[in-house]
Amino acid sequence: MAMTTLSTTIDADNAGRVDLVVRQLSGSSHSQVRGIVDHCCMSINGKPCDNIATPVVAGDVVSIRFDPTQRYHEKKKHWDDRTFNVLFEDNHLIVVDKSAGTLTVPTDRNEKNTLVERVSVYLSHSRGKQQAWVVHRLDRDVSGLLVFGKHEPIAERLIEQFKQRKPRRIYAAIVAGVMSNDSGTYRSHLATSKNLDRYVTRPSLKTELAITHYRVLKRMSDTTLVEVTLETGKRNQIRVHFADAGHPVLGDPRYKTKQAMHPRWIRKRIALHAKSLGFEHPISGKAMTFESPLPSALEKFLAKNR
């Protein structure tokens, strides 16, 4: 490996961003310069610098020590976004852990900073300039796992899996009251009111069949921790089913809100978390399963009620 050291002293004519100086000094492309900087090959006045946007002024000495025959690839930057964390990503899809308080997609009000928008921004920084294609959704105040397609055909294949009820979706919920049965299934038809609330009703052409399985994980003095498995995935399904059974999810602002209030549940979010997601990879056919730990809000509530 033949290392080369090049230096230059900044004058008034080339003062500005250091990456422009490095490019002129090395004769490299923009991407190569970013790689050189990322690999700690640059210094300013003898001090290492890893920020390509660092300004330099007249009198500064910029030096680079690198191998001209080597291709320096830019290192992938850590993405910091409060709305989601990336759990898995390949050329076809991305699995994220959504934060509570974030809409998955905009409503008729055209809200900004929705999850699909934020994930698309993240993907736009990749070489392929990809975008997120919605496959399924979580309510605004619910946290947990979601998969997006990076291309429309991939999203369509995943959507078809959901239509056929193939993906395995497991939630954790803290509900009001002490549930008597250790496990059970809610099977009913849901309809939508004029204010967009959902409710249980008789079957008709305008209703949707919703099936929710549950098992009790822990009973406390006046609440219950349950694990919920969706067989169908209708809007607000878990919230409506448990509210209809007299055990609304803590913090729910829409369904049996008075019962859903609890003196020790002080969070604005709902005590509902999508903790496990399993599906077949639409290209390889490989079975994929992802897990998300309980958010701190649920963990803290459980710890105080042991």
Image: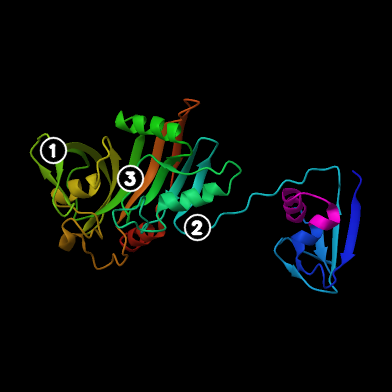
Name the amino acid type tagged 1. Answer: Lys
Q: Which residue is mark 3?
A: 171
| Percent x, y of residue 105 | 36, 50
Colouring: rainbow
Q: Secondary structure at mark 2?
A: loop
**Is disc 1 surrounded by few (<14), some (14 to 19) or many (20+) residues within 10 Å?**
few
Q: CA distance from mark 3 to mark 1?
A: 27 Å
Residue 170 visible from this viewpoint: yes
Examine the rendered structure and indicate whether residue 121 appears above or below residue 148.
below
For image coordinates 27% across by 35% down, the residue present is 231
Does the segment drawn in magenta span residue 28?
Answer: yes
Q: Nearer the viewer, mark 2 or mark 1?
A: 1
Nearer-N-terminus badge (2/3): 2
Q: Secondary structure at mark 3?
A: strand
Q: Quadrant of the N terminus?
A: top right
Q: Which mark is residue 206?
A: 1
Q: Which residue is mark 2?
A: 81
Examine the rendered structure and indicate whether residue 12 appears above or below residue 107.
below
| Percent x, y of residue 264 | 28, 67
40 left or right of 243 in image? right
Name the amino acid type tagged 2. Answer: Asp
Name the amino acid type tagged 3. Answer: Tyr
| Percent x, y of residue 115 | 41, 52
Q: Nearer the viewer, residue 59 or 255?
A: 59
**Is disc 3 surrounded by few (<14), some (14 to 19) or many (20+) residues within 10 Å?**
many
For image coordinates 88% across by 64% down, the residue present is 8
For image coordinates 49% across by 41% down, the residue present is 94
Which contiguous range is marked in magenta? 23-38
Examine the rendered structure and indicate whether residue 138 appears above or below residue 24.
above
